Image (cartoon, grey):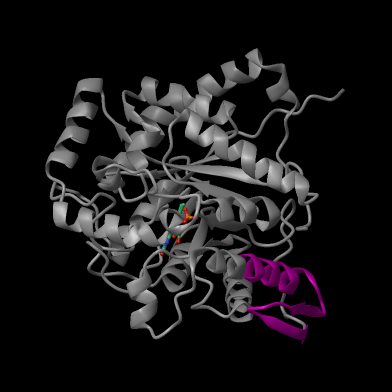
Amino acid sequence: MSRTRPAPLKFAYWVPNVSGGLVTSTIEQRTDWGYDYNRKLAQTAENNGFEYALSQVRYMASYGADHQHESTSFSLALLLATERLKVIAAVHPGLWQPGVLAKWVATADHLSGGRAAVNVVSGWFKGEFTALGEPWLEHDERYRRSEEFIRVLREIWTSDNANFQGDFYRIHDFDLKPKPLDVPGRPHPEIFQGGNSTAARRNGGRVSDWYFSNGKDFDGFSEQVTEVNQHAEDAGRAGAVRFALNGFMIARDSEREARETLREIIAKANSDAVEGFRSAVQQAGASTSDKRGMWADSTFEDLVQYNDGFRTQLIGTPEQIADRAVEYKRRGANLLLLGFLHFQEEVEYFGRHVLPIIREKEAELDARSPEALLQSVPGPTPAA
Ligand SMILES: Cc1cc2nc3c(=O)[nH]c(=O)nc-3n(C[C@H](O)[C@H](O)[C@H](O)COP(=O)(O)O)c2cc1C
């Protein structure tokens, strides 16, 4: 039997395209949300081991994030400023018509040499939809709409005569020209999905290329991998979904320094904003009957990093962080999505001090685990 080396763990960073940084705290954050900072950051990131960047979509202030750059236009600007980085633009079904987005992505893909991707987010911020005069659907209806949205994107990108009859979207004999670029190993631009509720796990398995988990400990992450893989198998797409996990990284020369930084972030938390966020995100998984999903069991401290990034515990020395990163890989992570306090300098620190140790430990893992050697990157599998 031929042995395939497992794909190396991939890395993405959160694009700081909204103001206030990645933690809701008054601690100094040497991170800027403007374009000049972000252009340089994207270039630094692609030279320090990052294959992806994930932009955020926010239309108005939300418990911090007072200023926001629009996700798709900002993502395109970063694609044009870089050479290899894949930039994932976050989009809300309900605010975008999927055919229009499919067209936008196709153009962005041509302009960037095949590096455009999307993150389909079903939304938690009711006030934003209300302010824009759009209906706010109940939680599982939002996910039903997101599933259709993803199916429409895939249909339009891969068919010369796209047709779709759904409850939310209808497409009639639509032929997108040009199609996205033909990139080896990629049937169409990659479709990520954010959300961890029961409905999100189902969509992850049934239609997504990538499933994004919020920050989680080892068991919390493994549980999702198992369940999403089961949904994928039930939908005839066994092994087709790849897994990405969010984590807020505090890598310092000593563990004490890293822990002290975490302590200071939390001690200086902006309590009103964190509590406001906590109440708004009750619209997410907590609003469903089984009460599973993002933020459903988050503590105040977790929410200071608004994607539960401390829970992944990528906090300590490069060696300690590398051990955890490799353990997450062993449990099924294909990609780590990282946030930082001071993005520019910490992305560089990651590339210089953390990544080389992760690569060493991955090689040890591969040598130890024969199953890992037989695992290969999932190929294109059609959605059910
Ligand atoms: C990695 C990741 C990125 C996300 N980015 C955004 C975003 O930019 N804008 C947004 O409104 N929601 C974003 N979300 C949140 C989703 O819209 C959704 O509300 C959330 O995942 C809750 O889903 P759940 O109820 O299925 O757990 C993101 C979620 C994840 C996991």
Vertical comparison of 344 with 18: above or below: above
Residue at 72%, 83% in the rendered image:
171
What quarter of the picture does the N terminus occupy? top right
Q: Position of residue 7 (x, y in %)?
A: 65, 34
Image quadrant of residue 133? Answer: bottom left
Relative placement, left or right, of 271 versus 181 is: left
Q: Can I make out residue 180 in this image? A: no
- Left or right of residue 71, residue 210 in this image: right
The picture places residue 114, in percent across and down from the top left corner, at 63, 62
Closest to the observer: 9 or 213? 213
Q: Nearer the viewer, residue 225 or 365?
A: 225
Give the residue furthest to the right: 1
Seen at 29% across and 51% down, the residue is: 22
Residue appearing at x 44%, y 83% in the figure:
134
Is residue 342 visible in this depiction of the protein? yes
Q: Quadrant of ligand 1?
A: bottom left
Image position, residue 236 (x, y; %): 80, 49
Closest to the observer, 252 or 18: 18
Q: Which residues are magenta?
A: 147-173
Relative to 228, is 110 above or below? below
**Quadrant into which the C terminus falls:** bottom right
Instruction: Kindly give the residue lying farthest to the front in the view shown.
Output: 289
- In the image, residue 29 lies in the stretch drawn in magenta: no
Residue 340: % across, % down: 31, 44
Q: Up-down: is 279 above or below 74? A: above
Q: Quadrant of residue 187?
A: bottom right
- The answer to whether residue 379 is left or right of residue 306 is right
Q: Is residue 149 magenta?
A: yes
Q: How many marks?
A: 0
